[in-house]
Image (tube, helix red, strand yellow):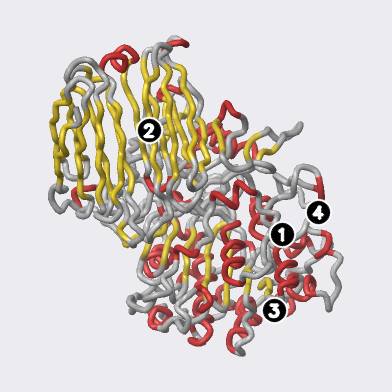
């Protein structure tokens, strides 16, 4: 079918959406009356947004280091390496990029126990391909107009169905009952409960918006047409793989709201009909309290389909919502992606420890470790890799970034939080419920209407010109590789619930290094510890609010001459400990960070346990200023730094003159309860320098 059959409808300017005042009668979450969840397919965060200003992308100053000693962006490829690259095409947004492996084993192989160095071996070189603003103008403009979440993860280190089960049911089945756990796309039919069933019990209205294709039964391939990719639902309504939905008859809410949809096969396959039911519900004021949108294959953005086909499809729903200002004023639309599709993302996802050798957790990890079978390796289910999430609503205007850890179950938690009462999804595991947020931090219910008149580009040119399958474009890295540049500048950042600290110290005489993890914030956090050169495997530490954990790394007793341990946490939190074991015995320091949220400052308390004076240098990497202090034997000094100028961001490197191998590195963001800015170092610190941080030297404590 040619382009003449495509409905000629121009998406209206989204500036109208931003000008629509929020329903703000109660100035609370209760003002949200409609929640719309729009889940697309198979794109990672870095693959789409790694170059975007003010997010943790390709310019991450605290990206993890691989066992090779290079940053995670230098992915090993035999004796060589592959860096992220933009393929040599006019526009990635209109390119039919070949699909990349994204099954359980290949994704866990890329993750490699947290080493994160197996992307090329398991996915091929095309995994490193990325897009930029010129390729994806609509996606970038949506993020600039509303709120982008740069620590939103898919739920599973695996393919579509297990991730969509998390979206709709909170998990992928427990270890045995109900036919689970399901770590592939086998779609055999299962018996565990779903979240929409709990919505029914709570009296909350809901609906799945989809096209039925040839039918929403096994005979109709559950809505996936195969040969007609511009209709149907691509089989992405995972509720239909649960027996209670398969067996539901008309009159049962499970049938009426999950097994109905448009039927454009009976309408001469006119794509304009894909939006009829949603349009009618919005115009008649009948949009349910909770909606799920499932696209036909060609509009899902799943490779090899062009991303801008998806942009056109998304824009139609936004235009329909904004055509009824009363409805949009009460609506929160979440645009996310079910999994990364095999495309590289540099941020190692938070995972529970599989055993005590892999770390510790203060919260139960029950049902978070796959036991393995003859086909699939035993490993944590997730969290999976980062995927894009844009929060589109009258309460999330203004180009914000939110860096709280989320996954697909966060959407369930958001609905739970909104409607309260007895609405709770017990399928969500204790570990996952503790670690991921509920997405409420992405909203401003106090003053949501301060940002207006932001324009999104039109998407009429993104409409498919035909309804045919297109050959794959095979991405090949350039001969001369360079690290991609991230757009300079900052964006406003939402306040986060993290107050984290880590303290490390060498213990004698066995020369073991002990690290203590503490959490005085309001959200459970996952710390990841890596050892230089892979002397120790990566470890993961989950710490609930008000709790601590401690663990030990053997050094001298197993013949290691050096200590090289790094600790990573949410929102750029970092601690690094380096030094020769001999040097640490003689010149190690005891370095502690003390936060002052009221003054937005940090005090570095440095103690010299040695019997000789230590000449110490503190380099502030944000201001570029160095302070040199002498600490007498057994003494300590306190150095206070105001973080006002950099909105709470800090990055200090502490060294000792007598041993150049010793280095203590403390970096992160001090949360004060107020909104701030994204990490100024993400796009190049020179673009944000406002001068030196204020600094006061404390008194000696000898």
Q: Residue at x 36, y 75 (%)?
A: 455
Left or right: 195 as drawn, with respect to 116: right
In the image shown, does 87 or 296 lie closer to the viewer?
296
Q: Give the label on residue 268, or none.
A: 3
Q: Nearer the viewer, mark 1 or mark 4?
A: 4
Say which label, 2 or 4, has the lower sequence index.
4
Say which label, 1 or 4, has the lower sequence index.
4
Question: x, y percentage for residue 501?
Answer: 38, 40
Say which label, 3 or 1, has the lower sequence index.
1
- Tell me if label 3 and label 1 are in contact, CB under 8 Å: no
Mark 1 crowdedness (10 Å alpha carbons): few <14, some 14-19, many ≥20: many
Q: Quadrant of the N terminus?
A: bottom right
Instruction: From the image, tell me which residue sits under label 2.
Output: 503
Instruction: From the image, tell me which residue sits under label 1.
Output: 238
Distance between mark 1 and mark 4 Cα atoms: 10 Å
Distance between mark 3 and mark 2 Cα atoms: 66 Å
Q: Give the label on residue 190, or none.
A: 4
- Tell me if label 4 and label 3 are in contact, CB under 8 Å: no
Quadrant housing residue 477: top left
Left or right: 647 as drawn, with respect to 80: left
Distance between mark 3 and mark 1 Cα atoms: 27 Å
Q: Nearer the viewer, mark 2 or mark 1?
A: 2
Left or right: 455 as drawn, with respect to 392: left
Above or below, 288 against 670 in this view is below
Distance between mark 4 and mark 3 Cα atoms: 35 Å
């Amino acid at each position: 079918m040619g382009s003449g059959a495509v409905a000629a409808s121009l998406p209206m300017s989204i500036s109208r959406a931003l000008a629509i005042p929020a329903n703000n009668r109660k100035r609370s979450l209760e003002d949200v009356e409609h929640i719309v969840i729009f889940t697309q397919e198979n794109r990672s965060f870095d693959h789409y947004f790694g170059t975007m200003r003010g997010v943790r992308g390709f310019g991450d100053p605290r990206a993890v280091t691989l066992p090779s000693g290079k940053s995670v962006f230098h992915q090993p490829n035999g004796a060589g390496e592959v860096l992220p690259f933009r393929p040599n095409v006019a526009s990635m947004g209109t390119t039919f990029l070949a699909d990349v492996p994204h099954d359980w084993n290949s994704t866990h192989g890329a993750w490699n126990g947290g080493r994160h160095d197996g992307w090329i071996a398991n996915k091929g070189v095309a995994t490193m391909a990325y897009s930029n603003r010129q390729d994806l103008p609509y996606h970038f403009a949506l993020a600039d107009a509303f709120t982008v979440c740069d620590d939103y993860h898919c739920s599973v280190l695996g393919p579509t169905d297990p991730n969509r089960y998390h979206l709709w049911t909170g998990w992928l089945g427990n270890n045995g009952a109900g036919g689970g756990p399901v770590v592939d796309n086998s779609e055999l039919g299962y018996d565990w409960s779903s979240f929409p069933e709990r919505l029914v019990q709570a009296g909350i209205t809901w609906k799945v918006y989809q096209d039925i294709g040839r039918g929403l039964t096994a005979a109709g391939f559950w809505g996936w047409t195969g040969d007609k990719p511009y209709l149907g639902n691509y089989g992405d309504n995972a509720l239909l793989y649960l027996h209670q939905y398969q067996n539901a008859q008309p009159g049962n809410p499970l049938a009426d709201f999950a097994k109905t949809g448009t039927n454009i096969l009976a309408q001469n396959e006119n794509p304009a009909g894909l939006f009829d039911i949603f349009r009618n519900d919005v115009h008649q004021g009948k949009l349910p309290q909770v909606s799920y949108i499932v696209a036909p294959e060609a509009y899902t953005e799943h490779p090899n389909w062009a991303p801008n086909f998806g942009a056109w499809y998304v824009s139609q729903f936004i235009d329909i919502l904004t055509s009824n200002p009363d409805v949009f004023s009460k609506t929160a639309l979440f645009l996310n992606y079910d999994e990364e599709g095999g495309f590289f993302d540099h941020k190692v996802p938070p995972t529970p420890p599989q055993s005590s050798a892999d770390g510790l957790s203060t919260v139960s990890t029950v049902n978070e470790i796959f036991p393995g079978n003859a086909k699939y390796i035993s490993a944590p289910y997730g969290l999976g890799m980062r995927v894009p999430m844009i929060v589109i609503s009258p309460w999330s205007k203004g180009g914000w970034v939110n860096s709280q850890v989320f996954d697909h179950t966060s959407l369930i938690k958001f609905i739970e939080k909104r409607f309260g009462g007895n609405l709770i999804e017990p399928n969500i595991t204790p570990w996952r419920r503790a670690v991921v947020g509920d997405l409420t931090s992405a909203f401003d219910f106090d003053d949501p209407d301060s940002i207006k008149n932001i324009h999104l580009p039109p998407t009429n040119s993104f409409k498919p010109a035909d309804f045919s399958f297109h050959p794959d474009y095979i991405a090949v890295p350039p001969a001369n590789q360079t690290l991609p540049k991230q757009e300079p500048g900052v964006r406003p950042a939402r306040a986060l619930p993290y107050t984290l600290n880590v303290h490390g110290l060498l213990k004698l005489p066995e020369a073991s290094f002990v690290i203590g993890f503490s959490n005085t914030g309001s959200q459970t956090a996952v710390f990841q510890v890596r050892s230089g050169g892979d002397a120790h495997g990566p470890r993961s530490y989950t710490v609930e609010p008000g709790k601590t954990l401690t663990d030990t790394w053997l050094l001298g007793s197993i013949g290691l001459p050096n200590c090289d341990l790094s600790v990573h946490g949410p929102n750029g939190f970092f601690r690094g400990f380096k030094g020769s074991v001999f040097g640490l015995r003689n010149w190690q320091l005891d370095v502690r960070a003390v936060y002052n949220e009221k003054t937005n400052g940090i005090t570095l308390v440095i103690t010299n346990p040695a019997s000789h004076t230590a000449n110490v240098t503190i380099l502030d990497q944000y201001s570029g200023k160095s302070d040199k202090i002498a600490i007498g034997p057994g003494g300590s000094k306190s150095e206070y730094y105001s973080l006002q100028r950099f909105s709470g961001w800090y990055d200090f490197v502490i060294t000792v003159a007598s041993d150049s191998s010793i280095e203590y590195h403390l970096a992160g963001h001090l949360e004060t309860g107020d909104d701030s800015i994204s990490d100024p170092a993400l796009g190049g610190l020179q673009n944000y320098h406002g001068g030196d941080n204020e600094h006061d030297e404390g008194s000696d404590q000898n």
